[in-house]
Image (cartoon, helix red, strand yellow):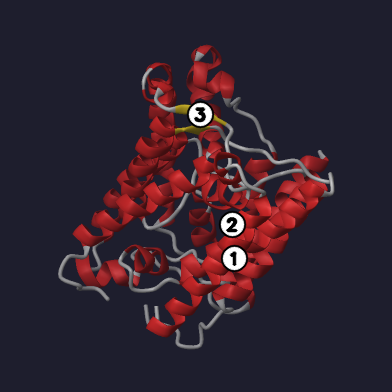
């Protein structure tokens, strides 16, 4: 669990600049703007179809977001692969079940982290689908197009995120 | 088929850059929400500003089209605030948690499972939400320059200047 001091990575400005170029290339060559949260809807549709295909076929939201493998689905899987490549080739891959900051505040218990992360995930995706986007779809793609929906959503993501983080880490432990 | 290959390649490069920029870790995400470490904000806004300039040049040249999400204040604000709560608890975003898993942070699995469940809950509630929250403040596909009634380059130049000033302030404050 020791912290690797040589894990310097790249400056966020450089990584961000290159990501900006990637976003431009994606729009230029394929007309695609990045997003991630719809993929979870499609995946859930897939899983529910195993149990009750008829019901999934009749549900309004799954008609809107069909359970299918599309550009975004592969994009999200690609994020996993890209991060795996970057971390293993730079020896920064590290198996960790409880983040350092979390551990400093709430201890090494895995169950506590698992429960909070699970609930957090469920709440986050519900909100993202209601907002019609996540930090990728609204934060990156919406903001770069100067969409009002992008900035309104992004500001709201941060407002309640800051409030929750402030409550969780009240007193400044786990820094 | 091509679409799927492009999706994979874009995802892999994006995941690679996210890992190099060290922005997919819980500690960095919460660091930003606790206003201690602005790494993710630097990354995000650098990529937004670069892509903003590039995409609007492509648009003006007639090479690319915008793909705007409609502004529905009910959905964007309520959904955005709900997302932020989940984000503060989980410490990962829908897209970045796949990257977190890719560099060995396996607590992201709880978030992914939570998101699959949360997406299912959203799909169940969608008919109700569509009649209520998603009706509030529907302005359609609007952008900042449209609303202000000015040329988009004025807005873009202003954003770039604001962004650079923000970055300089972060660096001065050591955030």
Name the residue located 77 percent from the left edge and 47 percent from the top edge. Answer: B59
Image x and y of residue B58, in percent:
79, 51
Name the residue located 52 percent from the left edge and 51 percent from the top edge. Answer: A139
- Tell me if B50 is positioned left or right of A142 in this view: right
Name the residue located 57 percent from the left edge and 53 percent from the top edge. Answer: A140
Q: Classify 10 Å Cα crowding around label 2: few (below 14), some (14-19), many (20 and above).
A: many
User: Residue beneath label 2, please?
Assistant: A80
Let me know if marks 2 and 1 both belong to one chain: no
User: Residue beneath label 1, please?
Assistant: B160
Q: Furthest-left residue in view?
A: A171
Relative depth, front residue between B59 and A122: B59
Where, quadrant-wise, is the C terminus of chain A in this rendering?
bottom left
Image position of A173 with respect to A44: above or below: below
User: Given the image, what chain letter belongs to the residue carrying mark 1?
Assistant: B
Mark 3 or 2: the one toward you: 3
- Is residue A88 in sight in this rendering? no
Relative depth, front residue between A105 and B88: B88
Tag shown at residue B139: 3
Image position of A102 with respect to B79: above or below: below
Image x and y of residue B125, in percent:
38, 22
Q: Quadrant of residue A126?
A: top left
Q: Furthest-bottom residue in view?
A: A6
Image x and y of residue B78, in percent:
35, 36
Image position of A80 with respect to A138: above or below: below
User: Given the image, what chain letter belongs to the residue carrying mark 2?
Assistant: A
């Amino acid at each position: 669990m020791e912290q690797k001091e040589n894990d310097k990575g790249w400056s966020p400005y450089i990584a961000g600049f290159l990501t900006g170029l990637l976003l431009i290339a994606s729009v230029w060559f394929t007309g695609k703007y990045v997003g991630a949260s719809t993929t979870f809807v499609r995946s859930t549709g897939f899983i529910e179809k195993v149990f009750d295909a008829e019901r999934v076929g009749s549900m309004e939201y799954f008609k809107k977001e069909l359970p299918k493998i599309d550009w975004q689905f592969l994009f999200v899987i690609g994020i996993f692969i890209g991060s795996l490549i970057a971390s293993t080739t730079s020896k920064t891959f590290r198996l960790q079940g409880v983040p350092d900051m979390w551990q400093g505040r709430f201890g090494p218990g895995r169950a506590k982290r698992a429960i909070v992360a699970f609930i957090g995930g469920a709440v986050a995706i519900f909100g993202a689908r209601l907002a019609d986007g996540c930090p990728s779809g609204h934060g990156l793609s919406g903001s770069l197009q100067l969409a009002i929906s992008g900035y309104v959503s992004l500001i709201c993501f941060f407002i309640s995120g800051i409030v929750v983080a402030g409550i969780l880490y009240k007193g400044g432990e786990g820094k | 088929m091509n679409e799927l290959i492009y999706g994979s390649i874009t995802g892999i490069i994006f995941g690679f850059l996210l890992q190099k920029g060290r922005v997919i870790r819980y500690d960095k995400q919460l660091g930003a929400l606790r206003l201690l470490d602005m790494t993710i904000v630097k990354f995000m806004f650098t990529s937004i500003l670069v892509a903003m300039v590039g995409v609007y040049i492509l648009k003006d040249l007639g090479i690319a089209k915008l793909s705007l999400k409609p502004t529905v204040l009910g959905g964007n604000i309520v959904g955005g605030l709900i997302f932020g709560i989940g984000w503060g608890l989980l410490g990962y975003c829908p897209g970045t948690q796949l990257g977190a898993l890719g560099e060995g942070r396996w607590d992201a699995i709880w978030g992914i499972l939570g998101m699959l469940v949360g997406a299912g809950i959203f799909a169940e509630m969608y008919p109700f939400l569509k009649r209520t929250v998603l009706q509030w403040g529907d302005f359609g596909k609007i952008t900042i320059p449209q609303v202000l009634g000015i040329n988009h380059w004025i807005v873009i130049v202003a954003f770039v200047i604001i962004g650079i000033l923000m970055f300089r302030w972060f660096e001065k404050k050591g955030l």
